[in-house]
Image (cartoon, helix red, strand yellow):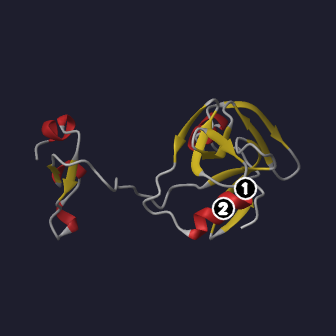
């Protein structure tokens, strides 16, 4: 598929040659499709930093931590812009940054939390899982949902297991 067709196509699937060394750009493998995408593709590259803010009920205010080898460790330097870090965590932009002894505390503009909905009403410990950013919320896709994800939600909401 030529690059200009790749830009115009709303949906596509990939069909890359077996020899990975011959492909430099995704558009070289793209083939347009007319069916809706049931399972959107995603990728996590080796240079990606998993970040979290720990210490408050809202996930956008607290001590900055990053995942290293499956363990959360405190970030004690500000090598990246606070705005970039807030955006990476889907928390808007930075409002306040504080350097403490061996850690960095960050407060971002957005308020993000998990809510459970029973029909159209918020429920305490059961219901459809939604992520609320400020005053709007979106349903969480259950395509790859497992007990592990359910346990994370219950723990975050202090609702047992």
**111 to the left or right of 25:** right
Above/below status of 39 relative to 56: below
User: Which residue does the image show at 13% across and 38% down from the upper left?
Assistant: 5
Could you say which quadrant of the image residue 135 lies in? top right
User: Which residue does the image show at 18% across and 41% down from the upper left?
Assistant: 6
- Please state which of residues 60 and 160 is positioned toward the viewer in this rendering: 160
Evaluate whether residue 25 shows in this view.
no
Residue 142 coordinates in the image, percent (x, y)? 47, 57
- Count of numbered tags: 2
**Dot 1, how many residues are within 10 Å of its Cα: few (below 14), some (14-19), or many (20+)?**
few
- Please state which of residues 52 and 132 is positioned toward the viewer in this rendering: 132
Label 1: state its secondary structure: helix
Evaluate whether residue 5 shows in this view.
yes
**Quarter of the C terminus within the rendering:** bottom right
Residue carrying label 2: 152
- Please state which of residues 70 and 47 is positioned toward the viewer in this rendering: 70
User: Which residue of the protein is positioned furthest toward the front in this rendering?
Assistant: 119
**19 to the left or right of 161:** left
User: Which residue of the protein is positioned furthest toward the left in this rendering?
Assistant: 1
Q: Do the residues labelled 1 and 2 touch (CB within 8 Å)?
A: yes
**Can you tell which mark lies on residue 90?**
none
Residue carrying label 1: 156
Label 2: state its secondary structure: helix
**27 to the left or right of 62:** left
Residue 36 coordinates in the image, percent (x, y)? 25, 47
Could you say which quadrant of the image residue 159 lies in? bottom right
């Amino acid at each position: 598929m030529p690059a200009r067709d790749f830009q115009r196509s709303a949906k596509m699937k990939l069909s890359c040659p077996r020899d990975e060394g011959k492909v430099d750009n995704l558009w070289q493998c793209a083939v347009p499709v007319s069916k809706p995408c049931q399972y959107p593709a995603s990728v996590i590259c080796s240079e990606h930093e998993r970040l979290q803010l720990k210490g408050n009920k809202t996930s956008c205010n607290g001590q900055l931590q990053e995942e290293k080898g499956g363990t959360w460790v405190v970030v004690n330097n500000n090598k990246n812009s606070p705005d970039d870090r807030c955006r990476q965590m889907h928390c808007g932009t930075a409002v306040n940054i504080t350097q403490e002894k061996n850690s960095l505390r960050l407060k971002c503009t957005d308020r993000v939390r998990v809510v459970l909905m029973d029909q159209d009403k918020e429920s305490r410990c059961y219901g459809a899982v939604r992520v609320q950013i400020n005053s709007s919320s979106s349903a969480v896709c259950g395509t790859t949902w497992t007990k592990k994800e359910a346990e994370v939600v219950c723990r975050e909401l202090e609702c047992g297991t």
